[in-house]
Amino acid sequence: MKNKTIDITKIWATLWSKRKLFFKVWGITFVLSCLLILPQPRYYTTEVSVAPESAEAKEAGSLASLASNFGVNIGNGYSDAIYPQLYPELFESTKFIVGLLDIKVRTKDGEVETDYYTYLRNHQKKNILLMPFLSLKRWVTSLFTPKDEEIPGKDGKRFNPFELSRTATGIVKDVQKNIQCTYSRTTDIVTIEVTDQDPLVCALLADSIKQHIQDFVTDYRTKKSRIDLEYYNMLTAEAKVNYDKARMKYAAFSDASTNVSLRSVELKMQDMENDMQAKYNIYTAMNTRLEAAMAKVQENTPAFTELKNATVPIKPAGPKRMIFVAAMLFLATCGTIVHLYRKELIEWF
């Protein structure tokens, strides 16, 4: 068995003698890295944090939350089907993402002001070096795929989540890449992170998406109460109409029978008064239920406490150009060393 030893002094002397080669490799790597990373569009990120009110069952909520920290599932502890832990899953829903495409955005320089769908489709910056390859890819793809056609939405909506065109499907995937939603089990805080090429668009989207989630959850939590409210509102309106008719009918008959003292007239007036009173009682009961239904809607409306608001980022989040160039120089150095000692490495292993 050969004695495998490493002579650091000899290695350093060899590397020093090849310093001109390293300078050439570093120079070429630096230029190529800059050419590759400098045209890459910069992007910005904005975070929004909210603490949503949940319909948590008081009996099991605290225990379930404590057990989840130890990886034990004893039930989600929530009486609602949509609770904060599922908020990140909303962004996997095509229907939810499609609802974001109509958000109005504008760039910081004021040159673009449109909806999010048009912005992603027509106003995204591309790496100039990659443009020929992207054009070639689109051309090759068009040879094997049928022409993309716009699919109209339903019920006055712009898009139909059930059936999207190929372009709209690609935009939906881009939106899902640009938005990250996370939930903290320990703090019950939902954090939304939005990434975009323009800082103002980034902030506008983060704030709009936060509001969109609030509206989505509020609509779900109050759906049953709003149906009840609409129902009792209809019954109350009908009871009011019936009471008004009975009251006017009683008043007209009473005025016409002022000087009449017949027993039959008195009995009819008494019957009409009783009917009017019965309709009034129904109207009062329906009005009471209507007020209770209005209170129920308010009770079921969740509250969202905003812990971190959306702000326009000042510095870009990436790409990290200096780190990229440094990483490429490091890899080039390692590759050059491996190339110089390839024979020794083969013998060593």
Image (cartoon, rainbow, N blue to C red):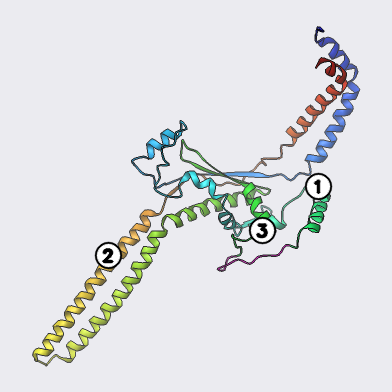
Q: Which mark is residue 307?
A: none
**For residue 288, which numbered disc appears in the image?**
2
Residue 155 is covered by the magenta coloring = yes
Q: Residue flagged by tag 2: what amino acid is it?
A: Thr
Disc 2 residue crowd, few under 14, some 14–19, many 20+, Cα 10 Å: some
Mark yes or no: residue 143 visible: yes
Residue 264 % position (x, y): 11, 89
Q: Amino acid at mark 1?
A: Leu
Whether residue 112 is visible? no
Structural crowding at the residue carrying mark 3, measured as other residues with C-alpha within 10 Å and reported as few (<14), some (14–19) or many (≥20) = many
Between disc 2 and disc 3, the foreground one is 3
Is 150 drawn above or below residue 170 in the view shown? below
According to the picture, the residue beneath numbered tag 1 turns out to be 130
**Magenta segment main secondary structure:** loop
Question: Disc 3 designates what residue?
Answer: 168
Q: Are marks 1 and 3 in contact (CB under 8 Å)?
A: no
Which image quadrant is residue 341 in?
A: top right
Query: Mark 3 is on which residue type?
Result: Ala
Measured as percent of width and height from the top left, residue 185 is found at: 47, 37
218 sits to left or right of 170? left
Report, in whole angstroms, how far the alpha carbon at label 2 lies from the one at label 3.
48 Å
The tag earlier along the polypeptide, 1 or 2, is: 1
Q: Quadrant of the N terminus?
A: top right
Task: Locate the C terminus and report the quarter of the image it occupies.
Answer: top right
C-alpha span from label 1 to label 3:
23 Å
Residue drawn where x is 46% and y is 40% of the image: 188
Is 126 inside the magenta-drawn segment? no
Q: Secondary structure at mark 2?
A: helix
Report the residue at 55% width, 55% height from top. Answer: 96
Residue 226 image offset from top left, x and y in percent: 39, 62
Disc 1/disc 2 C-alpha distance (Å)? 68 Å
